[in-house]
Amino acid sequence: MTAAGPILTVHRSTHQIGGNCIELAFDGHRLLLDAGEPLDTDESSPSERLIPSTLDTAGDIDALIISHPHQDHWGLVTQLPPHWPVWRGQGAGILMDMTARVRRQRIPGPLHTFRSGVPFTVGPFTITPYLTDHSAFDAHMLLVDCGGKRLLYSGDFRRTGRKRVLVDRMMAKPPKNVDVLLIEGTTLGREGTVRTEEELQSELETLFKTTEGRVFVSWSAQNIDRTVSLYKACKGARRAFVLDVYTLDVLERLSALGYRLPRLGLPGVRPVVTSGMIRLYGDPARMDCPSFVERCATTNGALGAAGLEKLRKSVVMLRPSLLRDFLAKGIVFDKHDAWVFSMWKGYLDKPDYQEVRKVFEAAGATVHEEKYHTSGHASGADLEEFARRMSPRYLVPVHGEAWDQHLGRFGNVLRLNDGEAFEIV
Ligand SMILES: [Zn+2]
Ligand SMILES: [Zn+2]
């Protein structure tokens, strides 16, 4: 007997942040929304364990739709059947490909590209992606129509980034008759004021103006909002913005799609070419693009790691691997320098960032661990307001650790467990 309505199964993320894997089944067809790696993945654990036990990988699916290019939303793709069709935004596709290459992987499967606001149909499912505001570039909410029912998946979002107007617009004119809203809840239980990217930019500019030596900053090269904040703060403080080959490559590939971003060749942007990057780009199993290193090295203002010794008025991208390259070239840090960690504080506990912290502390440099970051996720108040505006028949919590202590703030909650099927009727 066929079910009357589509069947929703959240295979993973009802009680954790990330590792999202959501299935909608109808009339013998299946659609997946995201296939993420859990954030707490232990690199030594067998990879099969990352596929949720309730997800049937023997059968076919009509499509896997990736909401945005964070690995807790797409990282499983490389382990799923290679013939499963994968849909993602154009910018997201570029970033996913780059991340996979760094990890000596390639994204398998027939690849398809969707565009924000343009509905597309696979089997009985019609999907409309809506570009949204998040710390990942090219992030989307996904509206799915199927069997006369309507599901809206928020993906990850916020109202404090450079694209917040997109969320405001959706709230001003919400999709009608939403049966199910799958909504993230990352910040629940971590309340506090969430600053805007622009506020953060002005605080960074002040820091750059008041620091005597160099400012080394650790942030995700794929967090484009943050790169823009740093670039503008550098301009305001008249500092050189020193970027490694990988960060420049990210900006170059996205700029090629027509986005106006800081990039190679712009005034104030200085490429630093290090030995680790020469290896990464020369490796056929990884980036396989030595010509881009050559372009960076021959662009005006290019320098090698040793050049940082004299470039005091600078803001420099710093990942643990870059630090190793800098130290190998004899770069010495001192008490006039500063190190800024501008990512989610959970990453700071990883051994390689502990190592970075030790190096700067030993040099007497100023260490800023939490001050210069703002969340990629909506505050609790924004989540409540968004949910109210969408006014769904059922609100299904995902991507959060503290939902159970905060359910009373939301209406029409349907609390599912991982792997529990729910028929939407
Ligand atoms: Zn996420
Ligand atoms: Zn995300």
Image (cartoon, rainbow, N blue to C red):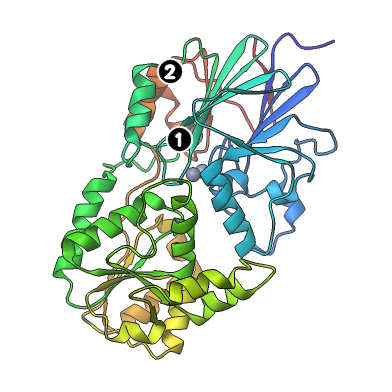
Disc 2 versus disc 1: distance between alpha carbons? 15 Å
Residue under circle 1? Answer: 185
Residue at left offset 73%, top offset 41%: 110
Look at the numbered disc 2 and say if its residue's Cβ is closer than 8 Å to ligand 1.
no
Identify the secondary structure beneath mark 1: loop
User: Could you tell me which quadrant the N terminus lies in?
Assistant: top right
Q: Nearer the viewer, mark 2 or mark 1?
A: 2
Horizontal arrangement in the rendering, residue 325 relative to residue 111 (left or right)? left
Task: Name the amino acid, label 1.
Answer: Gly
Q: Which x, y percent locates residue 423?
A: 68, 16
Horizontal arrangement in the rendering, residue 1 relative to residue 366 (left or right)? right
Task: Name the amino acid, label 2.
Answer: Met
Residue under circle 2? Answer: 390
Quadrant assignment, res 53: top right
Quadrant assignment, res 425: top right
Circle nearer the N terminus (2, 1): 1
Nearer to us in this view, 277 or 418:
277
Identify the secondary structure beneath mark 2: helix
Above or below, 334 relative to 231 = below
- Give the number of the disc on residue 310: none
Q: Which x, y percent locates residue 24?
A: 68, 24
Binning the other alpha carbons within 10 Å of mark 2 as few (below 14), some (14 to 19) or many (20 upward) gives many
Above or below, 242 relative to 185 = below
Q: Which x, y percent locates residue 373?
A: 32, 54
Residue at left offset 56%, top offset 71%: 291
Nearer to us in this view, 377 or 137:
137
Quadrant assignment, res 343: bottom left
Q: Is residue 175 visible?
A: yes
